[in-house]
Image (cartoon, rainbow, N blue to C red):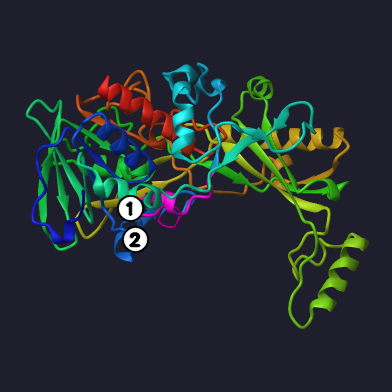
Amino acid sequence: MLFDFNLQTDINKNYDVCVVGTGPAGITLARKLSETGQKVLLLEAGGLGYSEQSQAFYECETVGHNAWPKFSRLRYFGGTSNHWAGRCRPFDSSDFNPREINGLPGWPIRYSDIKPYLNEAMEILDLDKKMGFQPVNDDLLKTRFSPDAYSNSPPTRFKDKYLSEIESSKNIDCYYNANAIDMRLDTSHQSITHIKVSNYNNFSTTVSAQKFILCLGGIETPRFMLNCKNQIPTGIGNSSDMVGRCFMEHLNVRMGSFLYRDIDNTEGMQFYADDAFVIKNTIGKSNITFGIVRKIKSYGRTKEIKNFFKNIACQMEIEEKIQFISEFKCPGMGNIGTLIEQSPNLDSRISLSKETDSFGLNRTKFDWQINDFDKKTIRKTGQAVAIEFAKANLGSVRLSDFILDETREIEFGRHAHHMGTTRMSESPQYGVVDQNSKVHDLDNLYIAGSSVFSTGGACNPTMPIMQLCLRLVDHLTG
C-alpha cells in the first residue's frame, strides 16, 4: 500500500520490519522481506518526484574536499537510481582478502558470502545473466592492467520498476513525505523501540517494529544516527566514535592525456589494475579509462575558421600554447580518467554541523580527505599505466605534473559513490555494523547500502549493494 504522509494523521504500529529509505537498498529489502510474509513499513522522506523542499535537506557544511552531496543524491522515491548511469560490476574475491590499511582491517566477510546472490542481483538490475560481465576491449596492456569487465543496466529506475508492485502489496505499507527524525532506545539501551516520523506540515508520530533497517546512504545514515542523541549524547550506535568515520569515494583523477596511434580501431580503452600489481606496491585498486577524441567539433558562423585554427595548432604541436584561447584535444588524442579506490581513513568523516534544518536536526559537517596511501595509489597507478601504454606501442602518454612531482597537489574529483561511514567490522573498535550488517551496540538495528563497505574496491557500488541486501534478507528470515 502507498500513502502520502502529508495527508495522514497516523501510521499503523504493528510491523515486523521498518525500512527507512527507498533507494535500491530499501526497495529491495522491503520487497524481498514482504515475499517471506514479513509485514514491512517502508518510509521515504521525499515525495514521488523531485522537490527542492526535500532536496534542501542535503545542504551541508563542507570543511574538506567538496563532493557536492546535494547534487549527487536524490531525495525522493527510488533515490539515486532516478539518475544513476547503470554501470555494474561485482567485487572481486580479492576485495575481501584479509588486509590492513591505515591501521584498519578490511572486510570481515569473504567473497563466498555474497557470491550466491549475484544472479538475483543481476535480475533486479535488469542485467543479462548469459552475457555476464564482458571485457570491454582486448588485452592490450598485457601486464599490470587487464581489460575492465562490466555490464550496463538500462539503467533500472527503481521507482518506475517497483512503485506499482509496492502500491499493490498487502505486506508493505509505504509512506512518502515521511521523515525519520529520531530513534528511541529501551531502558537498557540495547534495542530500538520506535522511530519518530514527521511530515512537512509539522505533524509527527512514532512507529514501532521488531527490527529497523537504515538505508539512507553514506552521508544521511550517519547523520541520522548522530542526531539521535536524546538518550546517548554521542548518538546511537556510536560507542566507539566510528559512526561517520572512514568516508570513501572513488577518486576521479585527471591522470593526463595521450596520443593514440590507431584511432580507427577503437572507441576507447578501459583497464583494471591487476591484483599482483596492487599487492606488490601496497596500493588501492584502480579503473583507468582512455577516452579518445574522434574529431574536432566546432559550431556557429565561425565553424570553418575554428576548424582551421585547431587543425593547424595540432599539426604544429602548439596546442598547449593556445590553451587559454580554446580547450580542446586533437583527433587521436584523449584524456585519461580514473575510478580509483580510496582507502578507509579515520579523518575523512561525516559529523554534525551547528546549523540545523527545519526539523531541528543538525546538518552534516562534511570533511572529505585523502591521505598518503591514496596519493601513492594515484601516482603509482599513473606512472605504471603510462609505461604499459608505451611498451604496448599504443601511443604516448603525457602525465599530469602532479603524478611525477610529489610537491604538487593532486587534482581529483568525485564519482558520487558515498561509502564506508558505517563500515562493517568484526569489532566495534573498527566499525559500526557486524558481519550481518547489524549495529554492534544494538539487538535490532541494521544498516544497508554502501555505507557498510569496509573497503570500496574500484567498481561502481550498486551490484555489491544488491548482493549484501539479499544476504541480509536471508539472515533476517533464516
What is the crowding at mark 1: few (fewer than 14 residues within 10 Å), some, or many (at least 20)?
many
Residue 346 falls left or right of residue 250: left
Question: Disc number at residue 265?
Answer: none
Q: Residue at x 43, y 29 (%)?
A: 467
Three-letter amino acid code of the residue under disc 1: Phe
Residue 104 can be seen in this image: no
Q: Are marks 1 and 2 in contact (CB under 8 Å)?
A: yes
Dot 1 falls on a residue whose secondary structure is: loop
Q: Position of residue 399 (x, y in %)?
A: 76, 45
Q: Along the line of sight, which residue is nearer the eye, 95 or 324?
A: 95
Splitting the image into 4 quarters, where does residue 319 fall? bottom right
Which quadrant is home to the C terminus? top left
Three-letter amino acid code of the residue under disc 2: Gly
Residue 159 can be seen in this image: yes
Q: Along the line of sight, which residue is nearer the eye, 427 or 165?
A: 165
Q: Along the line of sight, which residue is nearer the eye, 257 or 271?
A: 271
Dot 2 falls on a residue whose secondary structure is: loop
Give the residue at the far right of this rendering. Answer: 316
The Cα–Cα distance between marks 1 and 2, rounded to whole angstroms, is 7 Å
Which mark is first along the chain, 2 or 1? 2
Q: Residue at x 84, y 50 (%)?
A: 263
**Above or below, comparing residue 39 to residue 206 in the picture:** above
Q: Which residue matches tag 1?
A: 77
- Provide the residue span drawn in magenta: 70-86
Q: Which residue matches tag 2?
A: 49
